[in-house]
Amino acid sequence: MNQSAIASTTTTATLLCVDDEPNILSALRRLFRSSGYRVLTAESGSLGLEILEREPVDLVISDMRMPVMDGARFLAQVRRRWPDTLRVLLTGYSDIGAIQDAINCGEIYRYITKPWEDHDIVLLVRHGLERRQLEMEKGRLEALTARQNEELKALNQSLEAKVEARTRQLRAEHNATVAANNKLKQNFVTTIKILSSMIELRAHNQPGHARLVADLSRQIALALGLEARESQDVFIAALLHDIGKIGFDDKLLATPLTQLHGEALGQFRKHPVRAAELLMPLEELRGSAAILRSQLERFDGTGFPEGTAGLAIPVGARILAVAADYYNLQQGAMVQRHLRPEGARSLIVGASGTRYDPNVVAAFRQIVEGGGKGDTTGVELLSGELLPGMVLARDLVSRDGLMLLSADHVLDARMIQQVQDFETKSARRLSIWVRPPRNTG
């Protein structure tokens, strides 16, 4: 509060003068009214208390020597009942003991001796009121600060609670998004596997041919240290490596590669380009499309469609060429007779550096000669041994090549019952590979 505001407040203050001598009261009334104060008077302490009960008073000036109730007792009651009212003692004699009582009991602001100097008493009152106003303002500001601090504390607590609640909400939304994204990825791969099974039905391959090629391709990719995205592209390309043959007639599909000539051979050599064109519209499959386009390229540069050589051929295509040919040789798709695994392996090793990438062949040999199972971990169980919460380690495929459930599917009681019913109706036992139940703690 500035000085002008204090001066305005003090000049409109209300004073109460208490004295048993009327002439003293008249003198005080004239003096303070001329200074702009509102002045009330009482000729005894009891009358002064009555006025205080009716009127708000800023400052009391009381004479010390009064009958019945002296100034010390009067001011003591004022202090007890109206502690914010400033108290001044007016005394006309040098009674140190009485002044001490007034100071101790009434906690007076100042005492003035009679006769007084007008200028001094007016200045004393003005300073006292200014001090009172400052103390009241200080108290108001302290109360305001305390209240605002409490409000700020409550606001901070509210904000912290809101932030915590929002954080929990965002975390839940993030977890839900991650779960949904993982589910979409799983469904995406499952859809590719279903499409691969449909292609096999048209291509006259043995049931599960594409999955064998895909599993071997992924194992080679892991052995060569390819990143997860590259390995995924290789795996999907292997599942769909025959998609470009979808328009072939039955005769062309049934003819081994070494028996194809002329127009039929030319049509066969175009299937990688057609496969890439089918997949190019899908952003997620463009890496796999590039692999499929180059699957018939040879390491020595005599392949199709561009005659790309060596490391210029996408690494996924170099891997797919080895994995696909390994099983095609066993199934009679490349030569008239069906080779045994060791015979197919021998031909691939013999073509290292010409048809195939030597590094890919080395990784291939390490896998097939070491009997590795790559990432097909798990144990094989009977359907009656399945428990809810177990996770499929491999795709669940029927003897006819129909994919019933994809790998990583979490089994529940209803699904286990359906698997058991399928075995009963088909009279054939399924090959069920599972991992232990997932930890949900």
Image: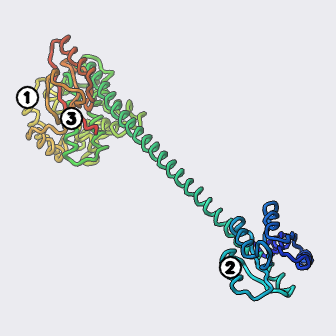
First in sequence: mark 1 vs mark 2: 2
Give residue 215's mark: 3
Q: The C terminus is located in which quarter?
A: top left
Give residue 340's mark: 1
Secondary structure under the numbered disc 2 in the rendered image = helix
Residue at point 21% right, 44% down? 222
5 sits left or right of 432 in the view:
right
Relative to 324, residue 429 above or below: above
Q: The N terminus is located in which quarter?
A: bottom right
Residue 425 or residue 235, whichever sits in front: 425
Relative to 389, residue 401 above or below: above
Kindly report the distance in space between the C-alpha atoms of the residues bearing marks 3 and 1.
19 Å
Residue located beneath label 2 in the image? 101
Residue at point 29% right, 35% down? 237
Q: Amino acid at mark 3?
A: Asp
Secondary structure under the numbered disc 1 in the rendered image = loop
Between disc 3 and disc 1, the foreground one is 3
219 sits left or right of 185 in the view:
left
Find residue 336 and report its horizontal and vertical position in percent: 13, 23
Residue ranking furthest to the front: 68
Residue at point 80% right, 63% down? 50
Q: Amino acid at mark 1?
A: Arg
